[in-house]
Image (cartoon, rainbow, N blue to C red):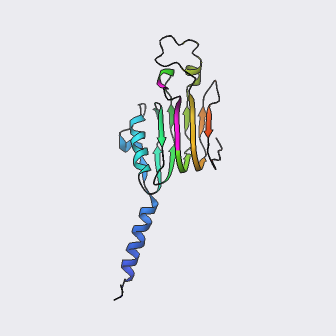
Amino acid sequence: MGLKMNLPTIALFLLLAAASAAGANINIRKYGAQVNSDITPALTKAWKDACQTPGTNTVVIPKGTYRLGAVQFMGPCKGHIELQVRGILLAPGDRGYFKSGSWVNFQRIDGFTLSGGGTFDAKGKHVWGKRSCSGIRYCGDLPISLRFDFITNGLIKDINHWIANSSTLICWAAKTLPSNM
């Protein structure tokens, strides 16, 4: 007994397969992010959702200025992820916010693109300019602004990175991570 499939059934199957491979386009505003506010919780949730969705997924930070606390974006993910930063992301201006030792950390991701033409403003002058630890909750080593650990098949393009007083972009055990920052 053979299985007969007509043309509309085959077309529907191919359409559903293509849609699932396409992934998702996730705007952080759908997660409650607003201009001139802290987007850390919204961006973290959007990343987790994109990471758990098969296919190629894009997390979009629209134009505008946003505050972003110390954050880690962890893999492995079920598909490729593109983080499109179209706006300006501002780091906290106090070393006390960097207990993990870095501001933005991407870890263990296979298939990752950072793009969008936006800016990471690490507020280097405010963070690195402090000479005393008096009144600072955490006062260890100076934080790393952008960190890429164990990234495979990655790409960094059209991103601005302002640090002011130091050059702290770290790539650790990354394979195929070209950049034109």
User: Where in the figure is residue 127, as x and y percent of width and height?
Assistant: 55, 21
User: Where in the figure is residue 25, as x and y percent of width and height?
Assistant: 44, 52
Is-magenta flag for residue 103?
yes
Quarter of the rendering occupied by the C terminus: top right
User: Where in the figure is residue 5, as x and y percent of width and height?
Assistant: 37, 83
Q: Is residue 24 visible?
A: yes
Q: Is residue 39 visible?
A: no
- Give whichever of 72, 16 is nearer the camera: 72
Is-magenta flag for residue 162?
no
- Give whichever of 105, 179 is nearer the camera: 105
User: Where in the figure is residue 33, as x and y percent of width and height?
Assistant: 39, 38
Can you say whether 98 is above or below 175 in the image?
A: above
Residue 83 shown left or right of residue 44 in the figure? right
State the residue at coordinates (42%, 54%): 24
Can you say whether 50 is above or below 167 in the image?
A: below
Q: How many marks?
A: 0
Numbered range of the magenta stretch: 97-107
Furthest toward the left, the residue is 1
Quarter of the rendering occupied by the N terminus: bottom left
State the residue at coordinates (57%, 46%): 151
Q: Quadrant of residue 132?
A: top right
State the residue at coordinates (40%, 76%): 11
Can you say whether 32 is above or below 67 in the image?
A: below
Residue 141 shown left or right of residue 27 in the figure? right
